[in-house]
Image (spheres, rainbow, N blue to C red):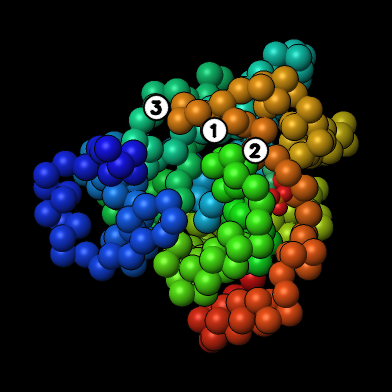
Amino acid sequence: VNLREDMVTEETRKLICSLPKDKDSQGNLCKYQGCWYYYNTLQAVINFQKSFQPQDTDIILASFPKSGTTWLKALTVALLERSKHEDDPLNHPLLSNNPHALVPLLESSTPDLTKFLPSSSTRLFSTHMPFHTVKEGLKGYPCKIVFICRNAKDELISRWYFRCKYENVEVTRSILESMCESLCRGSTFYGPIWDHVLSYWRGSLKDPSHVLFMKYEEIKEEPYAQLKRLAEFIGCPFTEEEEESGTVNKIVELCSLRSLSDLEANKTGKTLNGVDYKFFFRKGEVGDWKNHLTPEMKSRIDMIIEEKLRGSGLSF
Ligand code: A3P
């Protein structure tokens, strides 16, 4: 049994027959609404589009994989939970749960959509689907969407390390080279990355009160300002009193890679699919690609991304 295809229904199999197909070393891919999925994920996407029941106040955290999803989840949970834990900081959910356990993925094959934040009426979800595919499942409900974008070369390096850890294989250049090739062809899981990012970029330009476009690099550069921006967007801005008493910095600190990765829950826990939470924390640096990509790889990726983004007003 191919573990990436064992959940597919007969109806989805028929749909797959009509879709463009490709494959990578991990399995078969098909392109649905402009995005490449393994077959099980496509099934989960279709399940989401058909049966997800949105609520007006839902917040969706969207990203391309390895672009800062864990960080965005932690920051948003910390924002929504902050008032409850002022007097009881040791009982904070982020201290005993990995952010992925608190914010379920919409297109999960093992849906866990009932596990919402305990102290907030806001439901938080995450997704790696592109904007138009998510919108279809939201069925016109005015949910807020936050997207985090990361430099494509850093995303590639992060994904390379993650994949090797996940598959328990040595981190080799030949794997990086084949992943670079797939990235440039556009046929990566959830790719092409440029179409994915552009879908949210355009969504944010069209409807800025419902779609917030954030960048990993900007959060690294000015965490205080970006956290305030996120808080305002999701409707829980910091009060003057909170700013004066250092609440913003406390959240930044709580959600830093260093503090999160030091917690027992993140050192030893696993996702429902058995992925070690510790794999989600590595270096968290901007520009790590410089340590790994050849000048040829760099200029090839840059040229493609630049061409695809031309005229959009976006660079990443
Ligand atoms: P690196 O592999 O470059 O270190 P995702 O959460 O989307 O899977 O992305 C993982 C990337 O985000 C990894 O990047 C990881 O180290 C980084 N990351 C995880 N938690 C972070 C945090 N709290 N702050 C900053 N970066 C973080």
Crowding near the residue tagged with mark 3, few <14, some 14–19, many ≥20 C-alpha atoms within 10 Å: some
Dividing the picture into quadrants, the one containing residue 218 is bottom right
The amino acid type of the residue labelled 1 equals Val
Measured Cα–Cα span from mark 1 to mark 2: 8 Å
Instruction: In the rendered structure, find residue 112 and report the number of the disc placed on it.
Output: 3
Q: Is residue 240 left or right of residue 172?
A: right
| Front of the two marks 2 and 3 | 2
The amino acid type of the residue labelled 2 equals Phe
**Residue on which the image places disc 1:** 275
Q: Is residue 38 left or right of residue 144?
A: left
Q: Are marks 1 and 3 in contact (CB under 8 Å)?
A: no
The amino acid type of the residue labelled 3 equals Asp
Dividing the picture into quadrants, the one containing residue 2 is top left
Q: Does any portion of residue 228 appear in the rendered image?
A: no
**Residue on which the image places disc 2:** 279
Q: Nearer the viewer, residue 20 or 95?
A: 20
